[in-house]
């Protein structure tokens, strides 16, 4: 683990070393926010906007859904965000994972996504981890720092893991997924809604090529 400067911008540093992390935005002077958040303040009110700006949010996955979530979150005023992904960027991702470009092929999805969304809102502090959410370093103690978790995963095992941790810590979880032309979003609140594992989720036998 280390800073963005330590890991650098070379392909080698972001292609390998799972478990590494980087952060942008932390420690910067606070910029005037009235102009940037004027419309949000009018829509949400000052109190709710402040809650948004100070909420600690985790986005698990920085692929197709994760790219969209991260972009939307920083544009909506969320300023304290972490994201985790174990994958590197493949050329096949470029038709739908819009934060990535040809020059990013082979680099960490989480690291590149952090760089891209940070440019959308310099007020945000975005921390990225190139690692596996199922590793013990991302266990209960790690999750308890967050107020809200978004799942943007493409495998059932990891979804079940995040679901169980969020239920155990009573953390709100927004589960999402796509397959072909279909998509789903499920809010999960421990004790109030059914969880991800309340319904059967059998591994798919085939994947639509248009996903």
Image (cartoon, grey):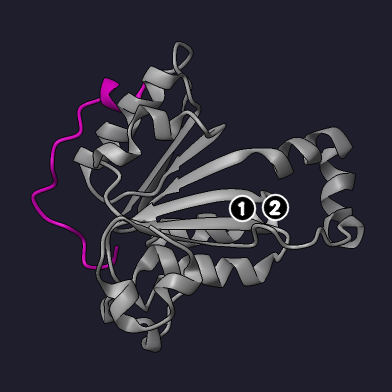
Q: Nearer the viewer, residue 40 or 210?
A: 40
Q: CA distance from mark 1 to mark 2?
A: 5 Å
In terms of secondary structure, what is the magenta stretch mainly?
loop
Looking at the image, is 191 positioned above or below residue 62? above
Residue bearing the label numbered 1: 73
Give, as a single range, the part of the protein colored magenta. Answer: 194-211
**Label 1 close to label 2 by CB (< 8 Å):** yes
On-image quarter of the C terminus: bottom left
Q: Position of residue 7 (x, y in %)?
A: 40, 72
Residue 82 seen in the current view: yes
Task: Name the residue carrying label 2.
Answer: 76
Residue 193, image quadrant: top left
| Numbered label attached to residue 205 | none
Q: Nearer the viewer, residue 135 or 150?
A: 135
Residue 198 inside the magenta-drawn segment:
yes
Counting other residues with Cα less than 10 Å from the Cα at mark 2, is it few (<14), some (14-19), or many (20 or more)?
some
- Give the structural element (helix, strand or loop) at label 2: loop
- Left/right of residue 210 with respect to residue 6 in the rendered view: left
Q: How many marks?
A: 2
**Extreme residue in the left direction:** 205
Residue at 90% of width from left, 46% of height from top? 42
Q: Is residue 114 magenta?
A: no
Picture coordinates of residue 109, whole percent (x, y): 37, 67
Asked if residue 194 can be seen in this view, the reply is no
- Secondary structure beneath disc 1? helix
Q: Relative to 118, say whether 203 is above or below.
A: above
């Amino acid at each position: 683990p280390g800073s963005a400067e330590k890991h650098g911008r070379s392909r080698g540093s972001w292609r390998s070393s799972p478990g590494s992390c980087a952060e942008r935005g932390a420690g910067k002077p606070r910029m005037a926010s009235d102009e940037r958040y004027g419309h949000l303040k009018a829509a949400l009110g000052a109190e709710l906007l402040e809650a948004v700006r100070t909420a600690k949010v985790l986005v698990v996955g920085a692929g197709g859904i994760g790219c969209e979530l991260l972009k939307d979150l920083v544009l909506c005023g969320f300023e304290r965000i972490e994201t985790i992904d174990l994958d590197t960027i493949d050329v096949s991702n470029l038709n739908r994972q819009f934060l990535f470009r040809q020059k990013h092929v082979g680099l960490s999805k989480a690291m590149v996504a952090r760089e891209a969304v940070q440019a959308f809102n310099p007020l945000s502090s975005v921390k990225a981890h190139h690692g596996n959410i199922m590793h013990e370093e991302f266990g209960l103690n790690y999750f308890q720092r967050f107020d809200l978790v978004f799942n943007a995963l493409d495998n059932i095992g990891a979804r079940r893991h995040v679901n169980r941790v969020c239920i155990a810590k009573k953390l709100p979880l927004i589960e999402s997924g796509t397959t072909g032309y279909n998509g789903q979003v499920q809010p999960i609140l421990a004790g109030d809604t059914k969880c991800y594992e309340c319904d059967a989720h059998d591994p798919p036998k085939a994947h639509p090529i248009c996903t």
